[in-house]
Image (tube, grey):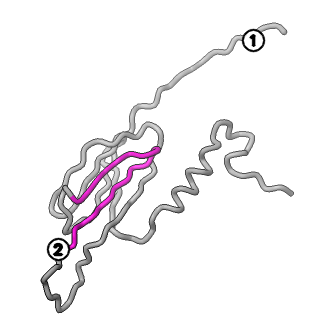
């Protein structure tokens, strides 16, 4: 018995990109850094919060690329000339990807107390009813 891929099932017409989306999501960085929360703030809005202690606004970039919210952080290592007895706060770069559904828009981003908040809103779906005329062949 042949196994059908998810995007090729006969009832899922036009969903060929779904399998690619699942693969891309699975490949996104799962190293756990930086930690984040996703919360639903209303029926049509969400907030992603990343713990980015030690990063300034200039160290962070937020872009939307191919229906994915990409948050990157790059700190400069200013440890030159300093002697650490213990170094537990790493100055490391990161990239965190969040796949966005169609109709989800990125709003504002706010930095507050070492937390980066990114607001998302889901637009009202267009409810379209289309009548198809049948012609004689």
Q: Residue furthest right?
A: 1
Residue under pointer 2: 78
> Closest to the observer: 18 or 62?
62
Residue positioned 55% across, 50% down in the render = 21
Is residue 70 one of those drawn in magenta? yes
- Element carrying mark 1: loop
Disc 1 target residue: 134
Residues at circles 1 and 2 in contact by the CB criterion of under 8 Å: no
Q: Characterize the magenta stretch by its predominant secondary structure.
A: strand
Q: Position of residue 72 (x, y in %)?
A: 33, 58
Which residue is at 17% across, 92% downward? Answer: 85
Eyeballing the image, is 19 above or below 133? below
Q: Residue furthest bottom?
A: 85
Residue 44 falls left or right of residue 112: right
Residues rendered magenta in the picture: 59-77
Q: Residues within 10 Å of mark 1 (few under 14, many from 20)?
A: few
Above/below status of 36 relative to 6: below
Q: Earlier in the sequence, mark 1 or mark 2?
A: 2
> Residue shown at 14%/88% (left/top)?
83
């Amino acid at each position: 018995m042949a196994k059908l891929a998810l995007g090729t099932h006969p009832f899922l017409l036009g969903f060929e990109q779904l399998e690619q989306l699942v693969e891309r999501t699975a490949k996104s960085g799962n190293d756990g850094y930086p930690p984040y929360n996703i919360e639903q703030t209303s029926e049509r809005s969400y907030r992603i919060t990343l713990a980015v202690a030690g990063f300034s606004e200039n160290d962070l970039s937020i872009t939307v690329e191919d229906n994915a919210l990409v948050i990157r952080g790059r700190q400069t290592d200013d440890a030159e000339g300093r002697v650490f007895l213990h170094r537990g706060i790493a100055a490391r770069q990161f990239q965190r990807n969040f796949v966005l559904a169609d109709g989800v828009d990125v709003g504002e981003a706010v930095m507050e107390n070492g937390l980066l908040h990114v607001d998302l809103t889901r637009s009202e779906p267009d409810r379209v009813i289309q009548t198809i005329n049948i012609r004689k062949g």
